Image: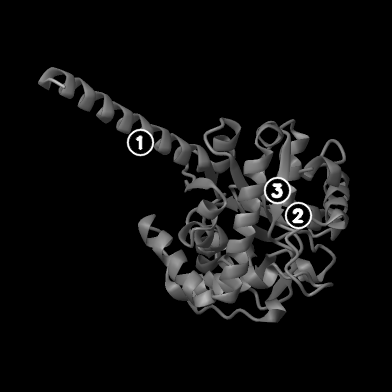
């Protein structure tokens, strides 16, 4: 074989080798399906299970390449899902029902919350139910559907004061009471040193308003064309939450990594309290287990309440919400 023939032969060998490498890369990329997940809020222990699933490789083991993209003021989580920029987000059940009622078909692929976290905290040293007609802080970003229903049914006549910083308004005395999440703003208030006792706290889950909250949702259109990816994401996320419950300190370390990377102003003590409460809320009161399922009876309760309070135009059923 002459030199020219040898060069041509070697070139073919190199091209063949590069082609094989290309095919191997393609197979790997194909095996790791891209999935973008956006939780409904900034980085915090409320989303610990998803961070754990990412950091412990549970998504990768399921054949998914997951990117966790947190929302911003200009790009809320739901907008990203509507625009197909994200494939799934977390929503409270009442939020999801309101969105579906407005014509956006959503499906629940995983339910994490089994209990309601909303509380009302009074700064007057009295039961919030005695504060009829007074000023109560509510989140301007939403999440207050159940509170509006409770206000109407209990004939409280609260004057709602919308704000992104209910805690600040409460601490300065600008409002008489405030809505708070038992895993978030409640502990923020405790950390300020204000006197907070059970006498001044009304917990929705203890008074006939125990409606589930956080679950993972995606558009029905995306779900119908990506059932396998949806199932993989749900199963790996569930695995992340189970691991977090079994290894809370390590899970907290992972949460703090995301907190620092996203430059969130918080502290480890608050995030530890949040994680502990979030994990408690995942345990069903009746079975005593983490069931990771949407309960038909709670969907019915939420739909009836919201219909009665005119927050829904039509009944929203379990069958409409659940991924099949």
Q: Is residue 203 left or right of residue 257?
A: right
Measured in 3D between alpha carbons, the distance from the residue under mark 1 to the one under mark 3, in whole angstroms, is 36 Å
Image quarter where the N terminus lies is top left
Q: Nearer the viewer, residue 274 or 307?
A: 274
Q: Which mark is residue 21?
A: 1
Secondary structure, mark 2, is helix
Q: Residue at x 50, y 66 (%)?
A: 172
The tag earlier along the polypeptide, 2 or 1, is 1
The tag earlier along the polypeptide, 3 or 2, is 3
Secondary structure, mark 3, is strand
Secondary structure, mark 1, is helix
Q: Residue at x 61, y 79 (%)?
A: 196
Q: Is residue 322 left or right of residue 66?
A: right
Please tell me whether residue 324 is drawn above or below residue 3 in the rendered image.
below
Q: Which residue is mark 2?
A: 146
Which callout, 3 or 2, points to the residue nearer the camera?
3
Q: Which residue is mark 3?
A: 109
């Amino acid at each position: 074989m002459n030199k020219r023939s040898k060069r041509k032969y070697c070139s073919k060998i190199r091209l063949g080798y590069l082609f094989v490498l290309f095919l191997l890369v393609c197979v790997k990329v194909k095996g790791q399906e891209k999935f973008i997940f956006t939780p409904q809020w900034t980085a915090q222990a409320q989303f610990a299970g998803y961070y754990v699933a990412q950091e412990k490789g549970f998504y990768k083991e399921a054949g998914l390449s997951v990117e966790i993209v947190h929302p911003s003021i200009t790009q809320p989580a739901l907008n990203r899902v509507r625009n197909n920029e994200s494939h799934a987000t977390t929503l409270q059940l009442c939020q999801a029902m309101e969105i579906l009622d407005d014509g956006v078909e959503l499906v629940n692929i995983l339910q994490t919350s089994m209990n309601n976290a909303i509380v009302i905290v009074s700064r007057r040293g009295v039961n919030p139910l005695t504060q009829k007609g007074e000023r109560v802080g509510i989140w301007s970003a939403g999440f207050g559907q159940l509170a509006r229903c409770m206000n109407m049914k209990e004939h409280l006549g609260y004057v709602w004061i919308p704000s992104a910083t209910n805690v600040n308004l409460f601490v300065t005395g600008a409002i008489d009471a405030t809505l708070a999440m038992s895993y978030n703003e409640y502990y923020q208030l405790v950390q300020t040193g204000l006197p907070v006792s059970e006498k001044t706290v009304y917990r929705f889950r203890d008074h006939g308003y125990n409606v589930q909250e956080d679950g993972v949702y995606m558009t029905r259109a995306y779900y119908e064309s990506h059932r396998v990816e949806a199932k993989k994401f749900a199963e790996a996320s569930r695995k992340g939450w189970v691991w977090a419950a079994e290894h809370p300190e390590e899970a907290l370390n992972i949460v703090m990594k995301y907190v620092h990377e996203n430059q969130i102003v918080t502290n480890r003590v608050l995030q530890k309290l949040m994680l502990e409460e979030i994990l408690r809320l995942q345990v069903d009161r009746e079975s005593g287990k983490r069931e990771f399922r949407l309960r038909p009876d709670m969907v019915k309760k939420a739909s009836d309440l919201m219909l009665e309070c005119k927050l829904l135009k039509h009944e929203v059923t379990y069958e409409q919400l659940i991924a099949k």
